[in-house]
Image (cartoon, rainbow, N blue to C red):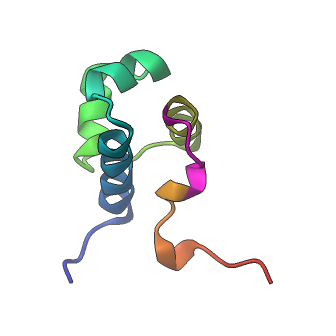
């Protein structure tokens, strides 16, 4: 398994969510107010998404923001 940073893994989760929703990066940039170039850098894992951005993305894509949390950081409620 490749050794990805947390930023890269979250970026992969966001990218997959965009594809699954049938949306484009330009659509998401407009829907969230994140500049397109900034979104592009973040989707490459070059810079990290902040919590507010992840909430905005989840809202725009109509999914839970928990989807962006890497599996090993999730806990199951008992």
**Residue 27 occupies which quadrant of the picture?**
top left
Q: Is residue 1 above or below residue 49?
A: below
Task: Provide residue 52's location: percent of width, then percent of height.
Answer: 59, 36
Q: Which residue is drawn at 34% across and 62% down?
A: 9
Quick one: quadrant of the C terminus?
A: bottom right
In the rendered view, does 51 fall on the left or right side of 4? right
- Residue sitting at the far right: 78
Residue plotted at (58% across, 57% down): 66
Left or right of residue 42: residue 30: right
Residue 12 at x, y = what percent?
30, 55
Name the residue nearer the viewer: 69 or 48: 69
Which residue is pictured at 39% across the width and 15% down the height?
Answer: 30
Q: Residue at x 46, y 68 (%)?
A: 70
Q: Is residue 3 above or below residue 36?
A: below
Q: Up-down: is 45 above or below 70?
A: above
* Magenta region includes residue 22: no
Magenta residues span: 61-66
């Amino acid at each position: 398994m490749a050794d990805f940073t947390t930023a890269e893994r979250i970026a992969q989760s966001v990218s997959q969510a965009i594809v699954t929703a049938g949306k484009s990066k330009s659509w998401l940039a407009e829907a969230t107010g994140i500049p397109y170039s900034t979104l592009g850098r973040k989707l490459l894992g070059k810079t990290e998404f902040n919590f507010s951005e992840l909430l905005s993305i989840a809202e725009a894509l109509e999914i839970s923001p928990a989807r962006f949390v890497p599996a090993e950081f999730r806990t199951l409620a008992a």
